Amino acid sequence: MNTLSSQFYTTPALTALFAANHQIACMLRFESALAQAEAATGVIPMAAAQAIGEACKAEYYDPAALAYAATTAGTVAIPLVQALTSKVASEYRAYVHWGATSQDVIDTAMVLQLREALKLIENDLLQLAAICARLAETHRHTIMAGRTLMQQAIPITFGLKAARWLALIVRQIQAIRTQSNQLYLQFGGAAGTLAALGPQGWQVAERLAEELDLELPDLPWHTERDRMAQLAASLAVLAASIGKIAQDVLLLAQTEVAEVAEAPAAGKGGSSAMPHKHNPIDTLMARAAAQHALGQLPIMLQAMLQEHERAAGYWQMEWQALPELVCATGGAVARLAAALEGLIVDEQQMADNLRMTHGMLMAESLSMALATQLGRPHAQQRVQQLCEQAHASKQPLETLALADPQIMMVLAPTAIRQAFDPARYLGSTDLLIDRALASYQQLGETTQ
Amino acid sequence: MNTLSSQFYTTPALTALFAANHQIACMLRFESALAQAEAATGVIPMAAAQAIGEACKAEYYDPAALAYAATTAGTVAIPLVQALTSKVASEYRAYVHWGATSQDVIDTAMVLQLREALKLIENDLLQLAAICARLAETHRHTIMAGRTLMQQAIPITFGLKAARWLALIVRQIQAIRTQSNQLYLQFGGAAGTLAALGPQGWQVAERLAEELDLELPDLPWHTERDRMAQLAASLAVLAASIGKIAQDVLLLAQTEVAEVAEAPAAGKGGSSAMPHKHNPIDTLMARAAAQHALGQLPIMLQAMLQEHERAAGYWQMEWQALPELVCATGGAVARLAAALEGLIVDEQQMADNLRMTHGMLMAESLSMALATQLGRPHAQQRVQQLCEQAHASKQPLETLALADPQIMMVLAPTAIRQAFDPARYLGSTDLLIDRALASYQQLGETTQ
Amino acid sequence: MNTLSSQFYTTPALTALFAANHQIACMLRFESALAQAEAATGVIPMAAAQAIGEACKAEYYDPAALAYAATTAGTVAIPLVQALTSKVASEYRAYVHWGATSQDVIDTAMVLQLREALKLIENDLLQLAAICARLAETHRHTIMAGRTLMQQAIPITFGLKAARWLALIVRQIQAIRTQSNQLYLQFGGAAGTLAALGPQGWQVAERLAEELDLELPDLPWHTERDRMAQLAASLAVLAASIGKIAQDVLLLAQTEVAEVAEAPAAGKGGSSAMPHKHNPIDTLMARAAAQHALGQLPIMLQAMLQEHERAAGYWQMEWQALPELVCATGGAVARLAAALEGLIVDEQQMADNLRMTHGMLMAESLSMALATQLGRPHAQQRVQQLCEQAHASKQPLETLALADPQIMMVLAPTAIRQAFDPARYLGSTDLLIDRALASYQQLGETTQ
Amino acid sequence: MNTLSSQFYTTPALTALFAANHQIACMLRFESALAQAEAATGVIPMAAAQAIGEACKAEYYDPAALAYAATTAGTVAIPLVQALTSKVASEYRAYVHWGATSQDVIDTAMVLQLREALKLIENDLLQLAAICARLAETHRHTIMAGRTLMQQAIPITFGLKAARWLALIVRQIQAIRTQSNQLYLQFGGAAGTLAALGPQGWQVAERLAEELDLELPDLPWHTERDRMAQLAASLAVLAASIGKIAQDVLLLAQTEVAEVAEAPAAGKGGSSAMPHKHNPIDTLMARAAAQHALGQLPIMLQAMLQEHERAAGYWQMEWQALPELVCATGGAVARLAAALEGLIVDEQQMADNLRMTHGMLMAESLSMALATQLGRPHAQQRVQQLCEQAHASKQPLETLALADPQIMMVLAPTAIRQAFDPARYLGSTDLLIDRALASYQQLGETTQ
């Protein structure tokens, strides 16, 4: 599907990875490496491997013609192997695709494409993590309202919010790296026995895995697709992580909250009707892309129900769902990075919003200050009554607390005033920011 | 996403409907009709409408450039309206896109695309129904094993199976027609009030609906997307219907069942490894396409959770999911029609399979014949014992029944033999085939 | 699954409908009606039908024992029919479940349960519609900010927002009624041929449909589950509709927006930590329930891929998904009705929020006022510049407009001031509210 | 939802883990451990911790009453903490739930429940693996048809099929163990800052994690739910793995294939209509349960989009979906183990089916034997022609090959006959079985 909108959800680099010509290039890489591996193990003549290798250049093949033939053949491997064979000198044609089956070349090419895609996504994630780390540092002390159930709750800092985003992204980077280290060769022949290679099948498999720098699996996995599904699931969890952060940003960017805004840019975020609009385009597209990615995961899980030694439809349904999942996930990452890169953080507005409930936000703080003396249930009950009074009378909670005989009996005015200071009610905020930054640092170290 | 495989799941005609240039054409059709409607209601000068109409030719616009600008703008409407404006004589530029918003043009263009797509799908469904009707007629008396829980159960006819497929398809055609009659104009302006048109907004809406031959909705539906979701759901039910039929065909085409086969064709259904294979390619691709379609529905349902007067991401996520759902559903229909068109039905094999359990398939028949005399529970129990005996001794159930004193006491040998004649145990089969054909006939009549 | 939380998402009445004892009651109702229909058509003796009918009392049967036996048998029909048979006088036992199969009784019982459930849900929807209609009337002139992409856009009224909710609910009521009118008997015998009833099968089916007051289907639908899937889809669209409204309420109830609040109640909406919290519990539970419902739909669609004449697992997977979908959808409706029933609408806050952007909200209004004179593109551009100036200088847009020579040249000060009056920029708001109320009225009329 | 069918999909032990009383027990365990940890770090008096600990006995609390109160409160934590407080001596009441919030106790209780559930599932998986290992060993040399696209392809052994199931299960056990080692404490207080505990918050967290034997997370994860989603995803991949194996069994158990059958048992697999049926009940229920589990995963992924510091609905929607996912996955494992435990494998039927295509299955074998001499393309083409001839004439392929001059020219009759011996065309089958068994052995070793 090549709609106008399809590029909204992804990046040009990812799109290119799954385009017809690159898939063909990866399939040819498999065929070439197969010939090499078979020559190295004495299964076919070295000259044949060389001849085949020379014919394995993507530019020799016409993607449109192959796609057309594939629609009837049911797999692009058949017309590609035919075309490749026709480009090899006749004495070596026998050795093209020797002992392999369509699924071997299609699955392994997909794995090669995924390897490149995961690398691109990881890079964008690292950039996103760097931005979040910067926000966490810069806004370590920028106090804002913490919000639960979409109501102001108690104070946090914007640095902590960014640190939580950071920790979430760091964990996703680790997950993507785990997946990148679990990319396996598929090589099993017609029904997973490597029968056509006689006793040498697994030796060829070992060599082929080396040639392609892929992991050698325990067994061929033609119809046991747990690894593909798990890769898809990890990407979906990443996509949903991006969705969570994007949603936070959208909520903070609402006109009435106005604590953050996307950096303006020419031609960005306007409206075809309203001249005043600056819409958070990158963020909302990140959210849309994340949802598009999530939508593809169930297809990949259904696709696990593959019959016997090759599935009739359930393998083929991976071919579109997985590229879409990968591309939309990567698109979500890139869009969110673009949104956060120049994010405008309005510290004044954060401070103003913090004060808008006239101290209600500090109710737990006051309650805890009273709890040791009054007992937590009693303290909570008393503060609840004051809150209702404050709400009804529109007076600040602090004023009411300072006038409450029961409270005055157990807390000095200074202590009451301190209980209303957001900066004094941040608990482990600083330490938690440090922990997030530390896990980000460790990430960098393990890369090297 | 334009992978090699993407065309496996759909048809060229459907792909073309959702391609960039056709989306632009539909958007221009909206802009042109809007100008017409506004001129007709005296909102803008007639000359302006004419000037705008002349500029609304898709070939004047560059899809790639618009797509590029749209990625930043967040919607293709903004750059398209700009480009359109620049093509209109300066005195009339004021009136381009007058009173409308991006969502009006994008949603209505999508509705126009959907109208064409539904028509294409309906046509393919009618062809599929015709094929099923032919199979139902032709094989009205072709007895085969009915199978429950993947075990042979009692006899049916292949005509009845085809009649059930037919009835299923007829109901889907009705559902698609219902959807085709519920295609509504979206026109609400910036926030659904048509404020920019002052008191004339709804009058323009009425006229615009007429111009585009669309239904006038009760209200603008910018963030109330139940109709879009329902359309998507109807298509998903259709896709799953195709999936059910495709699965039946695949099961019947198994080597060990071999009751049907796809017609062979050059370059179709082979294997890159196994020379003897004739794989049911069209059927399995129908199944894969159906699953791809099903995967998009949850996106459309999530997309209903749109905020306030225009959604931040949840509207935008419809843009890829809905075209994919439509195209994959249509692809599934077309592939299944191709598979059934030349379906080879092996009546002999059906008859052979019917006999393979040595009469077990007639156990219910025998049991019912005995039931009036012995009571259903007792009859069932006796037959069950005979079945176990038959299974253990590999003797035909009929032989055992004819030798069983208890059975002989209540049933004459002729009656026993009749109880083992599949043709005498088809119940309402004929009548049900008639009912399916009648509902298919009525369908044709309502079209005219 | 009987977790503590399971009741959060549904209502006691709906839970009761799908509980074991009520399912048994519905299955017995089928068996009793079947005997009646067969007696009426002369298939079994009238005395047998009477004896069977007397044994069909739910209180005679032990749900736990049946459930236990069913786990092994694979269907509750087998142990229930056995138990029922044992309760019938021996001379009539033969006629219990005569000619039917497990699927007939289980499917039809489900349909009977669904009929009751749809009625309950419709009633709650009618209550919800009444509340929305009241809000639409009461707040017809309560001006508030319309919001697009989570940014203030142009003015609307709260009455219009409620009218859009109303229209959405009205359409869902129509959809539920459509579904309620499409509840079909399932009756096909072992493999859908009614073979065990000889030539009288369909006659029994007709009579049985009458007895149960269900529709007679075109054909038995044992493995053609499009109607079940479509019912599920309609409920999912309803659930997502509830989700959309709940989300609007949650966004409006945010501390910083504060335009609506759920009515407080004892023990509701507090926090175990924060004494000041009044959380919108009903609304958020409506949203959670809606999402739980949405999650079940894909199961129902996958369940359509049923093999041959009875599915091996794909039929059985409907048994939990469909009740959950129904119950969670109904729960979402009931919870949202509870939330909206006493909804506190803060008109003053709506007015205050409207002013918070210092006139930006009226940018389109000003732009349209200028458009006829300056042309829409030029007008929009000029207003955009003023908006940026207003944003930078924190001056009201109106002040800047009144000081702008270009604007002053084409608009009189009064006209400019009028362009900044939200009440004058509501377009078709009133008419659209009327249209929503009219469709609600018609709904009532069609019921009678 | 407590339907009759709900227990079909799970086991009593898993159901019990998520029942109300056990959830309460786990929540009390958190409250007790919290008091201990706070006493140990000097936050509250040791006597208070002891008093609280004594009141934390599940039998003191009424699940129904708590559930009722929770429906209004929006969380069961509030009424439970109230009830607990009332059971503690008044001087210590202050210290109940000190510094914690509802989410801390609910999330951590869920983690404790999950730990037990994963253990149960792992045990059932180990049993399933043992069965598969036995099948792989026993049927190492039992030759059967390998099937691709539901067509017979080339020979494999049933041992290899079982070995592939085994390797799949072994990988799932590893995945479940990985998840079991990543069960983290949730402890963050009202908004994730642990503010109510002042500077001691994280110290308490560390001690609390120790008390509960849970991992200490990098940060509180109240609204960063990637770990929960990943756990859910791993279970879904497991469920789909079970689905794949169950589907293979169902296909092999078809009447026409008849290579395996579930062991018969009293009251199992019968039909309410057909006396001869032995339905594969456990296998089909495993498949239904797996699909029910898959249906819940998207809910868990959507649930990741949680707002700010506590979600309004998206947290709450995990509460039903996750238990259902866990229980249905575990149910699928247990049902499949029951099905495979006594699986009847019909080696004779496997051998018969292998011969049913009269040698077609050996087409690739013949083709490879010819390939070195004729070249692979030419060899494949010649064999394809012979296959078509064999199909048309119903003669064995071997007979035709032995009569083909072109073939006879390059292959001796013995070589041709050998090419038709399935036992000589098994390639790496034996080695792959060994690899699967080895990975199973290693699993056992890592447990100790």
Image: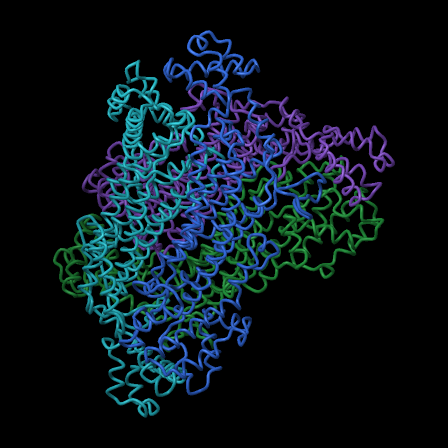
Chain colours: A cyan, B purple, C green, D blue
D38 relative to B79 in the view: left or right = right
Residue closest to the eye, A69 or D129: D129
Q: Which residue is located at x 64 percent, y 27 percent? A: B353
Depicted A211 relative to depicted C85: above or below: above
Depicted C36 relative to depicted D416: above or below: below
Camera sees residue B337:
yes
Q: Position of residue B446 (x, y in %)?
A: 56, 34
Q: Which residue is located at x 30 percent, y 64 percent? A: D219
Q: Position of residue B217 (x, y in %)?
A: 43, 49
Q: Position of residue C131 (x, y in %)?
A: 48, 65
The quarter of the picture where residue B150 lies is top right
User: What is the quadrant of the N terminus of chain B in the image?
Assistant: top left
B98 relative to C110 in the view: left or right = left
Find the residue positioned furthest to the left. Answer: C405
Q: Position of residue C334 (x, y in %)?
A: 51, 63
The quarter of the picture where residue A341 lies is bottom left
Depicted B296 relative to depicted D190: above or below: above
Camera sees residue C439:
no
